[in-house]
Image (spheres, helix red, strand yellow):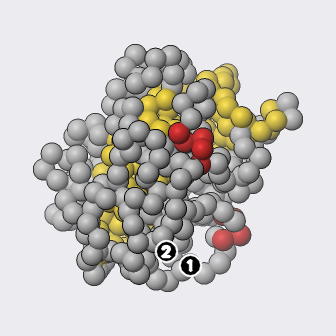
Amino acid sequence: MADTVAARTEPAGGGGTWRGILAAATLALVASAVTAIVGDGSTARAASIHARRIAGGLNAPVAFTFTPGGRIFYVEKTTGEIHILNPTTGRTALFFDVPGVNGDGERGMLGIALHPAFPHKPFVYVYATRVVNGHLRNQILRLTDVNGKGRRLRLLWSARASSNPYHNGGRILFGPDRKLYAVVGDAHDSSNSQDLTRNDRGKILRMTPSGGVPSGNPIPNSLIYAYGIRNSFGFAFDPQTGSLWETENGPECNDEVNLITAGSNYGWGPNETCSGTHPDDTNQDGPSPVFPSLFFLGTIGITGDAVCDGCHLNAASEGGLFWGSYNNGNVYRVDLNGTRDDTVNSTRTVVMTHSGSVLSMEVGPGGSIYFSDFSGIYRLVTG
C-alpha cells in the first residue's frame, strides 16, 4: 500500500524508543504497521529477503561495528561490556568493561566506532552514560586495542546527563572526512534542541579523532554540526556521496528520515504539537527548519539506517536506504534520487519483518547489511 502523504514535508516519530527497553523485549511486538494517517505508507514486503543470524544469545547488543577483517565489536547496553565476535567461529571475547555504566531507560552503552585507520591506529570509541563522582554523565571514551584487550581509557567528551532517562542519543560514527560524528538526544526537554549556547543536547556533534573541534564546523569553537534533533538512534553515510542520513523518533507522531547538512536546523523545539495530520507539527522551531525527506505520520520507533551499495540482495535494493523499526520489527527501504540528495517519493517498502525489535543497522565488509536485536546480530540475505 503506497503512502498517500507526499515526501519532503515533515517527520513522524516514535516517542521514547528504548522506553521500557528490556521489559519490552520480552513482550509480543505490535503486529500492524502505521500508514499515512492510519497506515505505514509501505508497499508489500519483498519476500525473498530474510535475516540470517550471525550470533545469538547476546545481551542487548544495541550497537556494533566491523573491523576491516570482519570481526565484530559490539557493546552491551546495560553491563558496559565491549565484546569482540568472530562471526566465522561464533566465539566472543571480552574486550573491556567500562565502569559505572547506567543502563536505565534509554541510557547505557549506546554507540561504538573504530578509528578509520584501524588497526594501524588501534582506537575503539564508545558512547556511554556513566555515574562519575556521583553524577550522571554522557561520555565519549577512547580505548586502545592491545592484543584484543582494551587499554588506556581516555575521555574525549563529557556532558551532564538528564535525570530523565530518555532521549539520550548515543550513535557514533566516523565520516568519510575521518571526523567522529555523534548524536545527542534532547534529554526529554525540547527546548534543549534549539539552544546553541554551550548545550550539546538535541544536536549532532562533529569532532576530531582526539575529541577536538575540527575546522569546517558551522559554529566557531563548537562541536555542534546540526541541531533541532529530538531522539535519534541511527545515522549512516552514503558511500558514494558522503551524505549523512539520519533516522529520528518523533513523539506520538512523525518519525522521520533526514538528510543532515552542516549548520542546519531540523526544527524540533518547544512549540511542537502532534495533530497526527500535519507534517509541520514537529518541525516548526528555530530559524529555517529543514523538513525531512520522508516521514511516518504515526510512529514505528524508527531505528538505524544503512545505504545499500553492493549489499548483495536484489536489483531493487541497490542504492536504496534501509532502516528498521523497534515497534514492529520491520526492515524498510526507500529509493534515493539520481543525485542521492533526497528520496524518490514517499513510497517505502517493507523488505522483511523480523521477530524482534530492530535496534541498530550497519554495513559490513563487502557491503552486506546487518542489524541487531536484543539477543543477536543478523545479516540481510536473499534466497
What x and y, as percent, mark residue 31?
A: 49, 83
Q: Is 322 drawn above or below residue 129 in the view shown? A: below
In this view, the residue farthest toward the left is 338
Instruction: Report crowding for label 2: few under 14, some 14 to 19, many 20 or more residues within 10 A (C-alpha).
Output: many
Tally the marks. 2
Residue at (38, 45) in percent of width and height: 289
What x and y, as percent, mark residue 355?
A: 51, 76
Q: Which sits in the foreground, 350 or 96?
A: 350
- For marks 2 and 1, the one nearer the N-term is 1
The image quarter in which residue 294 lies = bottom left
Report the quarter where the C terminus lies.
Answer: bottom left
| Viewer can see residue 70 | no
Numbered circle sitting on residue 328: 2
What x and y, as percent, mark residue 200?
A: 58, 33
Tag 1: residue type?
Leu
Residue at (56, 35) in percent of width and height: 195
Residue at (24, 56) in percent of width and height: 343
Q: Which sits in the foreground, 102 or 249?
A: 249
Tag 2: residue type?
Asn
Q: Is 189 drawn above or below residue 130 in the view shown? A: below
Numbered circle sitting on residue 29: 1
Q: Is 307 drawn above or below residue 149 in the view shown? A: below
Instruction: Report crowding for label 1: few under 14, some 14 to 19, many 20 or more residues within 10 A (C-alpha).
Output: some
Q: Secondary structure at mark 2?
A: loop
Left or right: where 59 falls relative to 372: right
What x and y, as percent, mark residue 226?
A: 44, 36
The CA span between labels 2 and 1 is 6 Å
Report the quarter where the N terminus lies.
Answer: bottom left
Residue at (34, 37) in percent of width and height: 261
| Viewer can see residue 375 | yes
Could you tell me if the residues under marks 2 and 1 are in contact, i.e. CB atoms within 8 Å?
yes
Q: Secondary structure at mark 1?
A: loop
